Image (cartoon, rainbow, N blue to C red):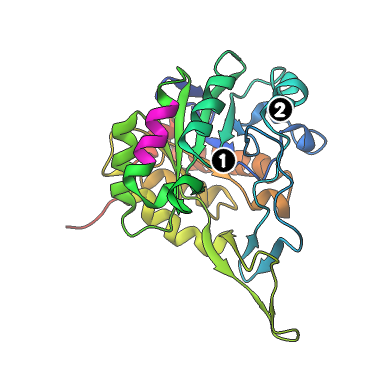
Amino acid sequence: MTTPNLAVKLGGLKLNNPVMTASGTFGYAGEFEPYIDLNRLGGIIVKGLSLEPSKGNPPPRIVETECGMLNAIGLENVGVDMFLCEKLPFLETLVPPAIANIYGKTVEEYAQLAQRLEPFEAVKGLEVNISCPNVKEGGVVFGSDPNLAFEVVKSVRAMTTKHLMVKLSPNVTDIVQMAKAVEDAGADSLSVINTITGMAVDLATRRPKLANVTGGLSGPAIKPIALRMVWQTAGAVNIPVVGVGGIMNATDVLEFLMVGATAVQVGTANFINPDCTMGILDEMAAWLCKEGVKDVNALIGSLVVDE
């Protein structure tokens, strides 16, 4: 059988395959150059960017858990200016589209970041992280309030012509409501889901294992929740959905595509095995050949649900 087609489209953004890397788990791509062929990836989403550099939270800020990990990194990053000066030139040499993940403490900060990145052609898209507290609203998380989420995305949309992906928080009562709100505000695609709030306790010291007390749970433990939310979201919106949460192998990727995802992001698995994305791509192509599937797009939304 001929090699199956792996190319997919996120609106106007073309990916050579549906396997992307998740923000915060892949640095700025150069860190993984010794381990994988970066040009084989479908897309690269860089570590979250803020207007100013951030040191993040104090350690300890990563804890291994059963079937996953908790992180309270606190969005440590080099800041947008250093990113453009020191990190973007390397990304410009790569084939996969680079997507900048952005976050702010106010609606205005999100808009300023989008405006700052707009002139740079090598940045093919923005992923808006709305799992952040709005300091002007007393710490209410943007991603937990559909009205606040709408305002953030609307403000970013006004400042950019780039592909606009919004990363939804699972820590909400109704993710479909959030998805529709940001779609109405101008999102081109959705990434579903961000981490789930959790915590871990050290029995011997009777203290939390994270200095921040709580953190974001990721890894295989959250995959069933992520699958459910992708399925719900993909069935409710008219824009592509990118599946995120516990993807470790090709089987996981194919399941996310079947429930409606157009592409996926691999995150925690990169910490366990830095070349996991290469294995995933090989396994996925082999499965498609074995099953006689000529085009990976045929799997998207192909889940059969009995009435």
Measured from the top left, where is residue 253 in percent x and y?
50, 46
Residue under numbered circle 1 = 286
How far separated are the C-alphas under marks 2 and 1? 37 Å
Measured from the top left, where is residue 207 in percent x and y?
70, 79
Q: Is residue 39 visible?
A: yes
Task: Name the kind of residue labelled 1 in the image.
Answer: Ala
Residue under the image location 34 percent in, 52 percent down: 175
* Sequence-wise first label, 2 or 1: 2
Measured from the top left, where is residue 108 in percent x and y?
48, 32
Q: Residues within 10 Å of mark 2 (few under 14, many from 20)?
A: some
Q: Using residue 44 as the reference point, say whether residue 12 is left or right of it.
A: left
Q: Residues within 10 Å of mark 1 (few under 14, many from 20)?
A: some
In reply to whether residue 150 is colored magenta, the answer given is yes
Q: How many marks?
A: 2
Please tell me which residue lies in front, 68 or 200: 200
In reply to whether residue 111 is colored magenta, the answer given is no
Q: Is residue 302 visible?
A: no
Measured from the top left, where is residue 79 in percent x and y?
69, 33
Q: Using residue 115 as the reference point, say whether residue 206 is left or right of it.
A: right
Vertical comparison of 63 with 234: above or below: below
Residue under numbered circle 2 = 83
Q: Using residue 140 as the reference point, say whether residue 245 is left or right of it.
A: right
Circles 2, 1 touching at the beta carbon (< 8 Å): no
Q: Quadrant of residue 209?
A: bottom right
Q: Using residue 31 as the reference point, say whether residue 48 is left or right of it.
A: left
Q: Quadrant of residue 83?
A: top right
Question: Mark 1 falls on what kind of element?
Answer: helix
Please tell me which residue lies in front, 133 or 274: 133
Q: Residue furthest right?
A: 34
What is the magenta range? 149-156
Task: Name the kind of residue labelled 2 in the image.
Answer: Phe
Residue under the image location 75 percent in, 64 percent down: 60
